[in-house]
Image (cartoon, helix red, strand yellow):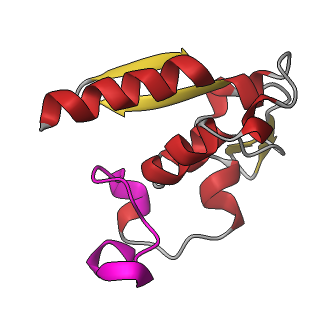
């Protein structure tokens, strides 16, 4: 299980992995069926809602640290009108916050300060 790996070999940086992802080997479907309500162009495939684009918000579900790093990279702002590159959703306790990338970075930094 990915969450059991320690040190630099660990590829999962989020502490709160959804149950349906915590105990599986991640393949195509795990990312391309994640958060279908956040994507345009979703289609039905074998009773699953599939989207062709995997966004930073999808990656952040398991890779919160990397999503924060990406948010600080200039490439995260390459297409400001593309909702897949400008909006990311992070689950915080029982609520979900929609933030633009710059706001997300500030929000995550403030959250880290409060947790210290």
- Residue 10, horizontal then vertical, whole percent: 40, 76
Q: Residue at x 14, y 35 (%)?
A: 115
> Is 12 left, or right, of 32 in this rendering?
left
| Residue nearest the viewer, comparing 96 with 37 | 96
- Residue 82, horizontal then vertical, whole percent: 84, 22
Q: Quadrant of residue 44?
A: top right
Residue 7: in magenta span: yes
Q: Residue at x 28, y 53 (%)?
A: 15
Can you say whether 109 is above or below 47 in the image?
A: above
- Residue 55, horizontal then vertical, whole percent: 70, 40
Answer yes or no: is residue 1 visible. Answer: no
Can you say whether 16 is above or below 114 in the image?
A: below
| Residue nearest the viewer, comparing 51 with 17 | 17
Q: Residue at x 55, y 47 (%)?
A: 69
- Residue 33, horizontal then vertical, whole percent: 65, 47
Image quadrant containing the C terminus: top left
Can you say whether 47 is above or below 115 in the image?
A: below
> Is 47 left, or right, of 94 in this rendering?
right
In magenta, the rendered stretch is: 1-21
Q: Quadrant of residue 2?
A: bottom left
Q: Residue at x 46, y 54 (%)?
A: 62
Residue 30: in magenta span: no
């Amino acid at each position: 299980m990915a969450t059991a790996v320690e040190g630099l070999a660990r590829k999962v940086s989020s502490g709160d992995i959804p149950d349906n992802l915590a105990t599986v080997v991640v393949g195509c479907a795990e990312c391309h069926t994640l958060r279908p309500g956040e994507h345009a162009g979703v289609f039905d495939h074998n009773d699953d809602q599939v989207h062709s684009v995997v966004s930073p918000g999808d990656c952040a579900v398991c890779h919160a640290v990397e999503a924060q790093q990406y948010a600080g990279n200039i490439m995260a702002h390459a297409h400001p009108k593309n909702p897949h590159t400008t909006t990311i959703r992070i689950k915080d306790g029982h609520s979900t916050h929609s933030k633009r990338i710059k706001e997300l970075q500030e929000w995550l930094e403030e959250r880290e300060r409060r947790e210290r």
